Amino acid sequence: MVSKFFLILAVGCVGCAHIDLDETYIKESFISSRWLEFIQDGATTREQVIQALGRPTEVYVNRRIFLFRLLLVEQDFSAHNYKNRMSRMSAGYNFLDPAAVNKRRQHLSLQGSPFLVSGRAGDEKNYWKILGREAEYSLVLVFDENGTLKTHNLVRVMP
Amino acid sequence: MNYWHVCVSIFALLFFSGCIALPIPTPEHHANYLGEGPINIPTRGRIEKENLAFIVSGKTLKEEIILHLGEPDAVLKKEMAFAYNWEMTAGYLLVAVPGGGAIGPIPRKHMLIIYFDDHNIVTSFAFKEGVFLSPEKEIKKIEGAADPEIP
């Protein structure tokens, strides 16, 4: 009788383990403090930004607004690596594994880097990195007429 | 089972073995193609209508739009219009045939189009969405229009 009770209890208590996605390492505040701390409103100049980040992805309003498209990716991964990974993933109908995603985010916080997409996503190199990214951001910098940073924002556009 | 029954069964198997296509609607969510990660698609994430309260036609500047929403997916009419595109999964289509089947996402495309005047101030903005919406066609329509301020 007792063993039957425990058997029913064991069967009844079999549930699904639930893990939430950890947003800590992809939050804009984390990315800014980890990689973009040199950007200071009222101090950083347009030239300093170009020197540190390179050519912006897009410029608007007569070069007053710079936009950098940044992808959070593995530092040592090539487009070829991402292509292979994506091919494997689409071949096998794997569902979202929050534990694996959280592990990758933590790894990227230590050994990842923001990859700057120069130009539109047309070429294959950019395309596979875009597909393989863990997160994507727009770094928007607005300069005054003297070329000094007036204001800026890092916007997470994906996920 | 007699000969007649066998004939009817073979006839039914040959001529009534069609496929079933069953759309399964779901709340809109990011299209991940059942992949491992949540984001393996090339488009940007969703822009919530509630997050656009800051846009006031005749007042909001282009720089405020970019600061809040990030990079537009298309810059049209020499910066007189911006388009933001994203794709969500609106459900799944289950196709079953005798001996097998497949399931795939039903994507719903979304567009936010914002128009500016010569002083980089928002004049109007509009949302478009639909399973059959083609952002490329919409962009061509705007590019082809004489006046970028299409409602």
Image: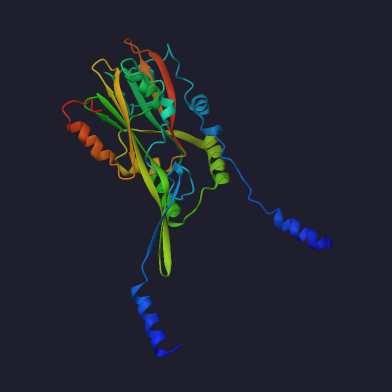
Q: Residue at x 38, y 49 (%)?
A: B106
x and y percent of residue B32 in the render?
Answer: 44, 46
Identify the image quadrant of the N terminus of chain A: bottom right
Q: Nearer the viewer, residue A6 or A156?
A: A6
Camera sees residue A151: yes
Indicate the quadrant where residue B3 lies: bottom left
Residue A50 seen in the figure: no
Q: How many marks?
A: 0
Instruction: From the viewer's side, name the closer residue of B1 and B131.
Output: B1
The residue closer to the viewer here, A85 or A28, is A28
Rendered view: B129 above or below A62: below
Asked which quadrant contains residue A51, the reply is top left
Q: Residue furthest right?
A: A2
Q: Tell whether A131 sits left or right of A14.
A: left
Q: Looking at the image, which residue is at 30% across and 45% down?
A: B132
Residue at point 23% right, 17% down?
B118
Query: Residue A141, how many percent across, how many down?
Result: 38, 20
Q: Which residue is at the far left?
A: B146
Residue B95 placement, left or right of A22: left
At 75% from the left and 56% from the top, the residue drawn is: A9
Here the colouring is: rainbow
Residue B24 position, x and y percent, is: 44, 52
> Residue A139: where, in percent of width, then height?
40, 26
Is residue A120 or residue B22 the one in the foreground? B22
